[in-house]
Image (cartoon, rainbow, N blue to C red):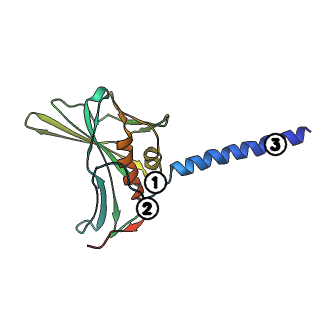
Amino acid sequence: MHYRRLVLFAVALVATAAASSSAQDAASRPPTERPFKHSTEIFEAYVSDADAVLVKSKPIRIVGGSGGEVELTAEFASRGQEVTRPDSILLGFISRSRVAKYNASTHLVLKADGEQISFDTTQLKIFVLNDSVIEMLFTPIPCNIFLRIANAKTVQVSLGDIKLELTEGHLEVLRDVASRTVPHSLPQR
């Protein structure tokens, strides 16, 4: 009798792990190609000088939270004339203000469906134009983690002290970029 309970427990444990693994696998897959619900332009273009295909979203505004207004963009490149699954995708945040908001030690922390994901590697570029400070903070995110973020139902963003929440429209743009990580050829022009 004890052995039977142990076997049933083991079977239940394996089934639970398989269901959890299946849910994680689904979250790490690119969304299927479909009409996405956003109006942001996604560029796919071959750049002959670099012998690479660039896939990039136009920046989209994120308003609110403690950070005011920030723009979000996502991009990746593939060597050659066809899109291949990238190792990582650059997630970018662009800020325009009168004073700098970020510094070299600013880290990106995301919460995707409650799971906290931290990134230590950020690239910060600061430009001063007239009275404005333009800051561009980019973080390379491994493709499988980007796919989990894009497939999430809720995503909160922390850039140092700045807190933002991504809307369904922002996530649709990320899902559209994620759907393009599936290897494919560019349409002939």
Rendered view: 44 above or below 11? below
Left or right: residue 160 versus residue 155 is left
Nearer to the camera, 144 or 69: 69
Q: Which mark is residue 182?
A: 2
Q: Which residue position holds label 3?
A: 8
- Residues tagged 1 and 2 counted as in contact (Cβ below 8 A): no
Quadrant holding the N terminus: top right
Q: Amino acid at mark 2?
A: Val
Disc on the earlier residue, 1 or 3:
3
Residue flagged by tag 1: what amino acid is it?
Pro
Mark 2 neighbour density, 10 Å: few (under 14) some (14–19) many (20 or more): some
Considering the numbered disc 3 on the image, is that residue within a helix, a strand or a loop? helix
Q: Which residue is mark 1?
A: 31
Determine the residue positioned at 33% across, 68% down. Answer: 186
Q: Position of residue 37 (x, y in %)?
A: 36, 49
Q: Quadrant of the C terminus?
A: bottom left
